[in-house]
Amino acid sequence: VYMLVDKVVELDAKPLREFPGFEGLAQDQQDLKALSLFDSPRTARRQCGRSQRVIKVPDSSVFERSTPYLLARGITRLVLEGNLISLDSND
């Protein structure tokens, strides 16, 4: 798994409304923050901006272990190839 990080703030979380394909979600769902994950470095580099860089996450279970930290930062979703993954147990 590959992800984009901002060179200044590290994790680059965006509201779900900024991701294509999630326009049909309820308004409160669209305000939730999500991290974008990619399955190939090539796809990640295409989405990478000037202030970002691509990093490889060698063990994707790191997201499971760091869930309390991500939730504390307001990140409740992961987006991987158009699939929405919930980190909180409420959904």
Image (tube, rainbow, N blue to C red):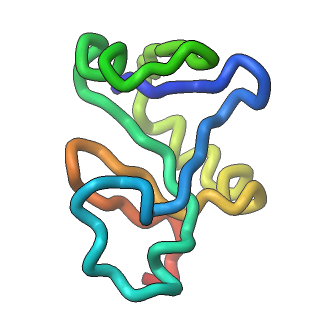
**For this view, does 68 lie left or right of residue 52?**
right
Which quadrant would residue 38 be assigned to in this image? top left
Task: Tell me which residue sits at (73%, 51%) in the image.
Answer: 69
**For this view, does 25 lie left or right of residue 28?**
left
Q: Is residue 65 shown above or below 10? A: below
Q: Position of residue 66 (x, y in %)?
A: 63, 45
Q: Is residue 67 shown above or below 66? A: below
Q: Position of residue 2 (x, y in %)?
A: 39, 23
**For this view, does 70 lie left or right of residue 40?**
right
Task: Tell me which residue sits at (21%, 43%) in the image.
Answer: 81
Q: Position of residue 43 (x, y in %)?
A: 25, 21
**For this view, does 13 lie left or right of residue 10?**
left
Task: Tell me which residue sits at (23%, 55%) in the image.
Answer: 83
- Kindly give the residue lying farthest to the front in the view shown: 50
Query: In which quadrant of the rendered image does the N terminus lie?
Result: top left
Of the pair 33 and 76, the residue shown nearer to us:
33
